[in-house]
Structures are given as C-alpha cells and as structure tokens.
Image (cartoon, helix red, strand yellow):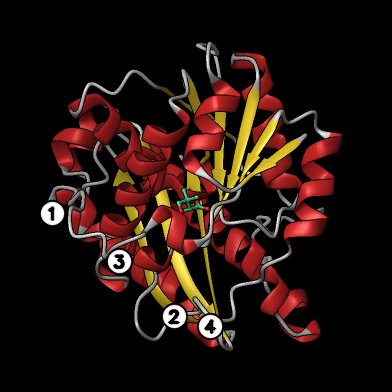
Amino acid sequence: MKIVTDIQELRDQLRGQNRASFVPTMGNLHEGHLSLMRIARQHGDPVIASIFVNRLQFGPNEDFDKYPRTLEADAEKLEKEGVYVLFAPTESVLYPEPQEYRVDPPKQLGDILEGEFRPGFFKGVCTVVLKLFSCVQPKVAVFGKKDYQQLMIIRQMAQQFALPVDIVAGETIRAEDGLALSSRNGYLTKEERTEAPQLQIALQNLRQEIQGLLGKAESSSITAHQLLALEQKASEALKNRGWVPDYIAIRKRSNLLAPNTEDLLTKKELVILTAAKLGKTRLIDNLEV
Ligand code: PAF
C-alpha cells in the first residue's frame, strides 16, 4: 500500500484508474471502517482510503485536538485489507489557505438533529468530502449508516452537483453487546462502556412502542403528538440512567422530517435517530423501523 500525502502525487498514482472505490475516514480505524473497505472492494478497484481529521467539522468546544490520531496502526490495518493507496494529507496540503469556499447543505436537512446540536458540522463535512472527491476522483464512495444524516446529506450533495460518484451505504457494525462501533467509544470509562449499549436498547424499545402503536390503532388516528410522547418517554428513560440526550427523534427515512398522520397512513418508512452524552462522551446511533 502506498501512503500519499500530496495531491499531485495522489493524482499521479491514480492516473488511468477510472473505477476507484473510495472510503474517506478521520482515522482511528475500527472494524466498522474496515467493513467499509470490504464493501468498497465489491464496488470498484482499486480501493483508496483517506485519513484526515477535518478541523472544519469540529465546533469550538469539540474534541478536534484530542481526536485520536493513530496513523501507523491505521495504515497496518488498511494494508491488510488490500487498500491500494492511503491518502493522508496534512492540514497545509488540504487547506493551504483558509477554505473560504464551502458547501452549505440546505437548512431543512443540514440544520436539524446533528446540525442543530453541532452548528456548521455538515458544512464542514460536505466541504471536505467534495474536496476529497476532487482529489481522488472515485467512481464509488462508501459511507457508514451509523452517520445516517451525514450519508443522506452527502448523497444529496452528489446528486445536486451531478458528481460522477455513486454513494454506497455500509451497515453499522456493532460490538457483541450492541454498541455501535465508533472512534469516540475509546473516550468511555469502564463503567460508561458497560452502560453504553443502553442507547441502542432505548432505540429498540422505542421501535417496539412505535410498532405497537401502529399495529394497535388505525394509522389514521395516530397523531404526531403520540409519536412525540413516545420520544419523550424514551428520552426520560435515558435521563433516568444518567444520560443527557440531545435528541431522540422518529423521522421519515426519505427526508428526516417528522412523519404526520398521512405519512403513517401511507406507511412511509421511518428511522429513529439519537445523540446523547454519557459523561463527557457524546454518542450517536439510529435504528430503522
Ligand atoms: O464520517 C467521518 O469520518 C467524517 O465525517 C468524514 C466523512 C471522513 C469527513 O471528514
């Protein structure tokens, strides 16, 4: 595997490759990332990975400085997965001057859920992803469903800019106890790590409640208010266990807006999304209904 830090060198290395499959990451790789590399391999050749901790997507009080940087160990893992090139630019390569042109996703998708609690996050993500696409020029790019809203926003960005990249989704990989794998799990204390799977359990309980409601009542009589009450209950249950939830929200998969009675009547597909703090660590997860 070749490790490339320079954009021109990357282009030289990839010249003539028109089926490249790309997985952008911020490093500190775990099995979730590696599963994306395997999906990438099924959709194109060669597989290119990037590691870049993108300052633009971190808020002023977030963990940019302490975000784990483990390049050597990451490179070993990628080599074993048969990755052809690892693009690992420094900040001065990717942002040699202040990045003044940015991609601002539409407010109705970019400013809700994660975007509400992490203002500017998706602007930072879209900007770096577009720039990485421009460096790598892949045919396919793979993103995990754990970052459900991110995947959706990137998909729409690619569509609206007619980018010649197919966006492929990878399922969330979980530890045996159900906790979604994430680089931020490493921040959890031992006790918090034991508690952490409760986030997924809260989503599963909520899904059961939704299914119960949909099964019991005529869909035409279910109101947005009833769904809000279920969200509230799930949030309270987490609070009682010591979590500080930012949101736990039942949304339509198509646009991440709250479903109305008509949506329930026409059986629109739903997803539950959550973000909650456990001690100092903020975890996110989701569950399709
Ligand atoms: O999901 C991530 O790791 C990051 O948001 C991404 C897509 C690599 C952009 O920095």
**Residue 227 seen:** no
Mark 2 = which residue?
62
Q: Residue at x 65, y 63 (%)?
A: 183
Q: Is residue 5 left or right of residue 115?
A: right
Q: Is mark 1 within 8 Å of ligand 1?
A: no
Mark 4 = which residue?
243
Packing grade of label 2 (10 A; few <14, some 14-19, many >=20) is few
Point out residue 121 in the picture as x, y percentages from the top left corner. 32, 63
Mark 1 = which residue?
107
Residue 113 drawn above or below residue 37: below
Please name which of the two marks, 4 or 2, marks the residue nearer to the observer: 2
Please name which of the two marks, 1 or 2, marks the residue nearer to the observer: 2
Amino acid marked by disc 1: Lys
Q: Are marks 1 and 2 in contact (CB under 8 Å)?
A: no
Amino acid marked by disc 3: Ala
Residue 287 drawn above or below residue 232: above
Check the picture and name the quadrant holding the N terminus: top right
* 81 or 263, nearer to the observer: 81
Q: Is mark 2 within 8 Å of ligand 1?
A: no
Q: Quadrant of residue 241?
A: bottom right
Q: Closer to the N terminus: mark 1 or mark 4?
A: 1
Amino acid marked by disc 4: Trp
Mark 3 = which residue?
229
Q: Secondary structure at mark 1?
A: helix
Q: Are marks 3 and 2 in contact (CB under 8 Å)?
A: no
Please name which of the two marks, 3 or 4, marks the residue nearer to the observer: 4
Q: Residue at x 80, y 33 (%)?
A: 81
Residue 164 drawn above or below residue 84: above
Q: What's the distance in space between the residues labelled 3 and 4, CA to CA?
A: 19 Å
Q: What's the distance in space between the residues labelled 1 and 2, CA to CA?
A: 22 Å
